[in-house]
Amino acid sequence: MRYALTRLGGMVLVLLIVAFCTFVVFYLVPSDPALLACGKPCTPENLALAREFMGFDEPWWQQFLTFLGGIFTGRTFGTGATAIHCAAPCFGYSFRQNTDVLELIGDRLPVTFSLAIGAAVLWVVAGVAIGVLAALRKDTWFDRVALAGSVIGVSAPVYLVGLLGILVLGFQLDVVPVGNYTAFADDPVRWAWGLVLPWCVLAFAHGAHYVKLTRSQMLETMSEDFIRTARAKGVPERTVVGKHALRNVLLPVVTLTGIEFGSLLGGAVITERVFSLPGLGGLLIEAVHNRDLPTLLGCTLFSGFLVVVANAVVDLSYGVLDPRARLT
Amino acid sequence: MSTPVARSVPAAIRSVLARDRWALAGTVTVVVIGLVAIFADVLTAIEGHDPYTYDATALDPATGLPAGSFGGISAEHWFGVEPLTGRDLFAIVVHGARTSFLIGLAATVVSIALGLLIGAAAGYLGGWADRVITWTADVFLGFPYLVFMIALGAVVPAEFPRALLLIVVIGFFGWPSTARIVRAQVLTLKDRNFVKAARVLGASPWQIFRTELLPNLWGPVLVMATLSVPGKIGLEAALSFLGVGVLPPTPSWGRSISAAIDWVQVDPVYLLIPGLALFAVTWGFNALGDGLRDALDPKSVTKR
């Protein structure tokens, strides 16, 4: 319990630091969102008005505090009839799109989550299974194919695999649909069918590491004394592998999953672009082209939050997998 | 316990290349593409095209596709031409190699240098310095850096040189993994007698780092550097692919692949050539790095 509480405190601290650094970087870079929003002709009075409206007239540290406050209590831009209210938790307000940033993120998040989580489940399960089998059948054709596949997966960029997948499976063989996303709520079957290729592509690119890791870990574990002891005791091989060995193998896999969460988001962003999925990646790229600073800041912070939370979950799950970790 | 690694780095490289044919193949690939990057101007001069000139005569006027089959591959255009612009694809790929290597290698130098200094400081100094550094590294490792880099690409003014920005940002986000490994190495090194002796003789931490620790770190650092180059090259390509990396018209493999999305059905050669180049470089560095690691670290058993 104390462990969980310390962990929670650390998490909040990390979030604050991430928010602070992101904020500073974005606001010290010379670019003025007010200038973009003030319209034409942009008179100095209009500009000052726009700055005041957006809250850019304050010193940066005060802006940061206002921003943080907005996350907890919401904030209001401007006064009187033209005021815009951004309800808590307020991650900023996009003046380009006239929308709450969190709302923009909320619109896109289901797509990115569908992609990322589906792919993650696929690659962890398939990666570990293939790695374990490859280790148990070391130096057979299965082992060689698995290793060759993982070498290709590690080296081939996800977008290249994706485009080749579209080219071969989508256009030439016409077995999977290309380029349409159906919301899960609308039609779960079409949702899954439309995401099959993106899932496989992302899982192939990320799962390769897991195959390599699981295989080497499994080989190491299977040569340890406690495995020999278990076998000598007459424990069935299935239990030796499934219970004694696998538990040791899963620890580094869980660690890797935690570390990879950030790059999973990155991978998802790229994969979305390849398959024209309307996810967070698309939102980011649009924001880049529109120079929509609040959206960029909001997206960066939000994904930072996601990663920190995911890492905390991974840390806590150690306790379940490894009794030794509960003591610290 | 296994035998300690007493072999020198050059000896390890030689033995890897002699015994491990995959590492050898990877090295050859890297060296060939590296030479291509260095002599890009010479190669394009021999072929007779540069990567910037539009050439409508190489295109099919009706569709904008390259004239001729296989993306317009001919004696005139060795790798064909880009659809819609008619720019020579060989010149683009060859100069793209230069972009990739420049940014990939320079970013690796930045991240390894940072990781080496920070990791050694954490391991050697210990105490609160160690705790702060380890904790910061953990935060950095999980940070969604790609999202951050995309956003940063938008706010940094266009006057700032793009290649430099990419080198600094990609290099900066790379230090934690290096620092972790260096820290672990230094933790075991600092209790060895030669380091203790230097300390007793009154050497400053910086002197100990330079003369006692650093010579023992070259092996792992070389492995880390080799294995992290492909990641850096891939990151540059990914950012360019997303439109926030190297700006046009500077050739970049990632941007060519991104442009190829719209043509993949009618002109797959346009996708395949920059794609294969990127794959070859990544694979080459990975194969070499894996081989080096197996040679320098007797504990690792990731044999193919």
Image (cartoon, rainbow, N blue to C red):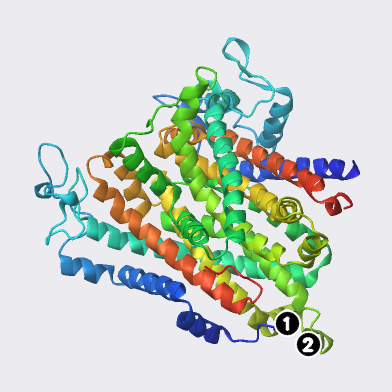
Q: Nearer the viewer, residue B172 or A219?
A: A219
Q: Position of residue B111 (x, y in %)?
A: 57, 64
Provide the chain ID for the residue under circle 2: B
Task: Check disc 1 and give the amino acid type.
Answer: Ile
Residue A122 falls left or right of residue B268 = right
In the depicted structure, whether residue A109 falls above or below residue A319: above
Residue named by callout 1: B208
The reply to whether callout 1 and callout 2 are in contact (CB within 8 Å) is yes
Q: Nearer the viewer, residue B117 or B278?
A: B278
How many neighbours does mark 2 have within 10 angstroms: few (below 14), some (14-19), or many (20 or more)? some
Quadrant location, the N terminus of chain A:
top right
In the depicted structure, whether residue B78 falls above or below residue B156: below
Residue named by callout 2: B198
Asked if residue A96 shows in the view, the reply is: no
In the depicted structure, whether residue B263 falls above or below residue B55: above
| Residue shown at the point (16%, 55%) measured from the top left | B73
Question: Regarding mark 1 in the picture, which secondary structure is present there?
Answer: helix
Question: Regarding mark 2 in the picture, which secondary structure is present there?
Answer: helix
Name the quadrant containing residue A181: top left
Q: Nearer the viewer, residue B53 or B214?
A: B214
Name the quadrant containing residue B202: bottom right
| Residue shown at the point (40%, 63%) measured from the top left | B281
Q: Position of residue A305 (x, y in %)?
A: 67, 38
Task: Check disc 2 and give the amino acid type.
Answer: Ala
| Residue shown at the point (81%, 90%) measured from the top left | B201
Labels 1 and 2: the sequence-earlier one: 2
Provide the chain ID for the residue under circle 1: B
Which residue of the protein is positioned furthest toward the front in this rendering?
Answer: A234
Q: Position of residue B42 (x, y in %)?
A: 23, 71
Residue B250 falls left or right of residue B116 = left
How many neighbours does mark 1 have within 10 angstroms: few (below 14), some (14-19), or many (20 or more)? some
